Amino acid sequence: APARFAQLEIEGIDSVATRLQLRGDEGSLRAELTTLTETSPIIFASGSAALDDDAAAVLDQAAEIIIAHPGLRVLIAGHTDSAGGAAQNEQLAAGRGAAVLQYLLSKGVPATRLQSVSYGELFPGQDQALNRRIEFEVAP
């Protein structure tokens, strides 16, 4: 508390933003995006990077959430199931991430706030269909 008050007494400083507050914003964004994709997963057809109407509806909500948290960056993580070869799946996951990135850009999310990464088949789950997914991560 003494350091905070000392800074506030310096002319021109009205408030102090702490790293703890910024982590709270990151945590909030992460929680909202995780809840969204857990309740309405963004799933692709096998071998495809095309977005369907259900995915577009979820991405509309994701765009609103991301825009509501200015200053934070989001990683779009593309995943695949284990069908096909590793190199093919890496490209497919990259295509899925790119499709989502382009969609979010079209909804007004600034390009500086988005980055796409491809995980291919590295993080499989129990459900084969859920492996063909997109996940969001809050960038550091």
Image (cartoon, rainbow, N blue to C red):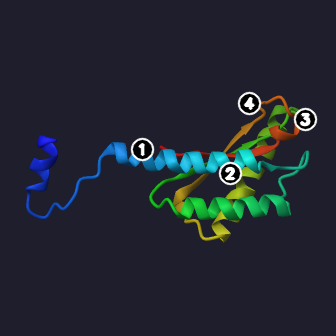
Disc number for residue 36: 2
Disc nearer the start of the sequence (1/3): 1
In the image, what residue occupies the spot 90% across and 46% down?
47
Quarter of the rendering occupied by the N terminus? top left
CA distance for labels 1 and 3: 39 Å
Q: Secondary structure at mark 4?
A: loop
Left-right relation of 130 to 30: right
Q: Does dot 1 land on a helix, a strand or a loop?
A: helix
- Give the image location of residue 53, x and y in percent: 84, 64
**Mark 4 residue type:** Leu
Distance, label 4 to label 3, CA atoms, is: 13 Å
Whichever of callouts 1 and 4 sits on the residue coming sooner in the sequence is 1
Query: Type of residue at label 3?
Result: Gly
Coordinates of residue 67 in the picture (x, y in percent): 54, 64
Q: Earlier in the sequence, mark 2 or mark 4?
A: 2
Q: Quadrant of residue 104?
A: bottom right
* Label 4 vs 3, first from the N-terminus: 3
Foreground pick, 3 / 115: 3
Tag 2: amino acid: Leu
The residue that appears at 87% across and 33% down in the rendered structure is: 85
Q: Position of residue 8 (x, y in %)?
A: 13, 55
13 relative position to 118: left or right: left
Could you tell which of marks 1 and 2 lies nearer the N-terminus? 1
Q: Nearer the viewer, mark 1 or mark 4?
A: 1
Q: Quickly name the residue at label 1.
A: 23
Q: Are marks 4 and 3 in contact (CB under 8 Å)?
A: no
Dot 1 amino acid type: Arg
Mark 4 — residue? 122
**Dot 1: few (<14), some (14–19), or many (≥20) neighbours within 10 Å?**
few
